[in-house]
Amino acid sequence: MERFRRLLTEPLVLASLAILVLLGVGEFLSPGFARGGQIARILTVSAILGLVSAGQALVVIGGREGIDLSVGALISLGALVAGNVMSGENGAIFSAILAAGGLAFVIGLVNGMGVTLVRIPPLVMTLGMMGVIQGGLVVLSRGIPSGNAAPALMTFINRPLVFGLPGVLFVWALVALAMWFILRRTALGYAIYAMGANERAARLCGVRTGLVRTLLYGLSGLMAGLTGVCVIGYTGNSFISVGDQYVLPSVIAVVIGGVSLAGGTGGYFGVVLGAIALTLLQSVLTTLQLEFWGRQLIFGAVLLGLMLLYGRTKRLRV
Amino acid sequence: MTAALTARSVQKRFGAAVALSNAALTLERGEVHALVGANGCGKSTLSKIIAGTVQRDSGDIVVNGAPLVLSSPAEAEANGISLFYQELSLIPQMSVEDNIFLGREPRNGAGFVDRKALAKKADALLQRFAPVAGRGLNSKARVSDLSPDQRQIVEIVKVLARDPDVVIFDEATAALDHRQVELFFRIIGEMKDKGVSFLFISHRLAEVFAVCDRITVMRNGESVDDFVTAETDMDTVVRAMVGDIAHDLDPAPSTDFTSASARLVVQGARGQRLQDVSFSLRPGEILGLGGLQGQGQSILLQSLFGAEPLTGGRVLIEGRPVVVRTPRAAVRHGFGYVSGDRGRDSALQGRSIFENMAIAEWVAERRRLVWPGRLQARLSEIAQSLNTKYPSLDAPIDALSGGNQQKVFIARWLATNPVVLLLDDPTKGIDLAAKADFFRLVRNLAAAGAAVLFYSSEDAELIGLCHRVLVFNSGRIVAELERAELTSFNLTGAAYGSAA
Ligand SMILES: Nc1ncnc2c1ncn2[C@@H]1O[C@H](COP(=O)(O)OP(=O)(O)OP(=O)(O)O)[C@@H](O)[C@H]1O
Ligand SMILES: [Mg+2]
């Protein structure tokens, strides 16, 4: 019994179970929900969420109350920049990725420096940055949607490439592989965990905690910028608040995946499952014709419920 | 008259690991009772069960003749039981007084916390330790600004503030120097006369024999022997603890270093609590830092390691001046640093034993890529040479007993093959046998050419291990004792010699 309970609170098990249950519920509510084409579409949306959650996961694992609330604004920024650089030209896709990713990376580094050098709490720093970017977007675009995706990018993200799966899924797989490699096969990865577990101890072992943490926020920015490119590829054109809807889900996906908000634990595989589970939940709620606010309510409740569940099992040990 | 507390055939498992198989003890009213045994034998687990922070699987605990079932520390406290936690339980961001009265703040008529009464009570309690408290320990100070010994004093005060009938001290003296310990024992004596009972856990047998009336010995989760202190001796107790021989520390071999040139030279070092510290250290030498607690020994070690700033002076390695501003630079210069404050400085909580051991090695060797499998064999060999008791390298560090954790952190630095090893009260919490193993490893390292700086709050360790000891007072070196002059008497004399 005890073991059964322990198993149930194991994040990976929980996320997998959630996926199965949601598939069943979806199929029950609207037959055809769990079919091939529909699954591919859900995976595509999951991939987009999964990409920003990768950066979010790194920041959270790094500890000291790490969180990046500016990812939503950075996605909007990435989409806008990419859309304007591309302006529908296939030839400009590469420069669009470079411009959107590069800009978001630099902004992420600024987040990181605010957190490490000025010691602004991450919540405040990234929230402030979110406001700055959103304001900047309004000023730059004068509120008028501009820029559109190149056809090749849209095909890559929306149309099946191999095995009926769109190209973006293979990008996601590559990112997952890279995340695994960084976290489990590089000294940097273990330094991130060490720092999340006990920053002072990590520093005393020779880890450059300030530098690593700054880099983590930079990477989170980079991933958000690239996600912005995918978002505009998914929808064709963008509006200035297109990224806002990703902020809360990126945090929830990380938590479902078993990354403690206190830092120092978890891996990306769980986050992948978390992103899929969350996207499924979103689809089910859409099937139920729940409005945006209704979905927001359920998402918030899921996050709090998870904190309750994991928080109980990970009580401070005395 | 009934005993204050009796524990009978207490059992506890953590998953597959058996922490207690048959623990038992009887604590009479107004006695100081020692609980001793090797690292990981179950002392802390038994204490936590008595204090309600860990639930037992089976067995009885009887308090004042009535069986006791506890489900929380608050219930234990209501029954007059108070525990001093080996891994301190203070909240670093809070003030000393708030920590002392955490959860039991005095209230005024309106039900609000009565800050004045709280401050007054805290001051009165701290006053008892005033002669040995050192700089900066007052009721308003933030706990994170305190030194390890000061935090230990606050934790003791926190326990005493609860007016307990039964007090368990789990390695409460590990960071205290002998002057602080003496005062602490005097306070215990006064309370004992008023009928308070104490369970006293320590790896320092001299202290056990100085303060305890009776001794219970545990081995592998089982209570194996009971002694009346006055009717036994240390050898007998040690034999009961380890099952066979006593581990004596053989005196350090006197080596002639005059030929070798200095590995580390410190000239006129100054820092926040250091004044004009100069010395040199040759390869193979084990140099002790002595004196009362908090006279600059730890600060010196941390400054050399780049964790605290030096404001003046020069440091030379192999004759070349170096500036070490970060621990990373120190590690790259071949320094290793073992802290005595493992919770704050060493433990990567929640991470595996393997990661906890390997992390410094990766930095020292400038690794970018790591293949976890590759280091396993070497690390487990080092851990085993310290007799570390652990289920597997993949188990989380938190599952180890306090002493076994400390062995992991020592192994962490031994693995880097340091050329200068800085030891900052490193034996805190490790048992006698492991201490002997550790000293042997340090000697071997020195014999292979490493230079060792060793601070200990225990004079016996300095005498047992060092070739030479620098005695500190108020951030300066006030005396230098050569091997031949290294006696407890001389160390104490020098420490007080020009004490402020
Ligand atoms: N939370 C836990 N999870 C798993 N195993 C544990 C846990 N706590 C303790 N143990 C195991 O129980 C045994 C007894 O540990 P305990 O902390 O009581 O030892 P101890 O006698 O206090 O040792 P020390 O002298 O090192 O402090 C050890 O083998 C330890 O590994
Ligand atoms: Mg213990």
Image (cartoon, rainbow, N blue to C red):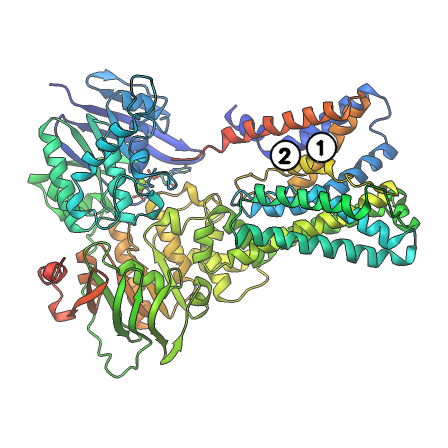
Callout 1 environment at 10 Å: few (<14), some (14 to 19), or many (20+)? many
In the image, are marks 2 and 1 on the same chain? yes
Which chain does the residue under circle 1 lie in? Answer: A
Going by the numbered disc 1, the residue's amino acid type is: Ala
Dots 2 and 1: beta carbons under 8 Å?
yes
Q: Quadrant of the N terminus of chain B?
A: top left
Going by the numbered disc 2, the residue's amino acid type is: Ile
Q: Secondary structure at mark 1?
A: helix
**Residue furthest to the bottom:** B259
Residue at (24, 29) in percent of width and height: B24
Q: Quadrant of the C terminus of chain B?
A: bottom left
Cα–Cα gap, marks 2 and 1:
9 Å
Q: Quadrant of ligand 1?
A: top left
Dot label at residue A256: 2
Find residue B35 and report its horizontal and vertical position in percent. 22, 37
When asked about the image quadrant of residue A103, the answer is bottom right
Residue that label 1 marks: A277
The image shows residue B172, relative to residue B190, as above or below, that is below
Left or right of A230: which side holds B80?
A: left
Residue at (17, 44) in percent of width and height: B130
Left or right of B209: which side holds B477?
A: right
Find residue B229 and report its horizontal and vertical position in percent. 10, 39
Callout 2 environment at 10 Å: few (<14), some (14 to 19), or many (20+)? many
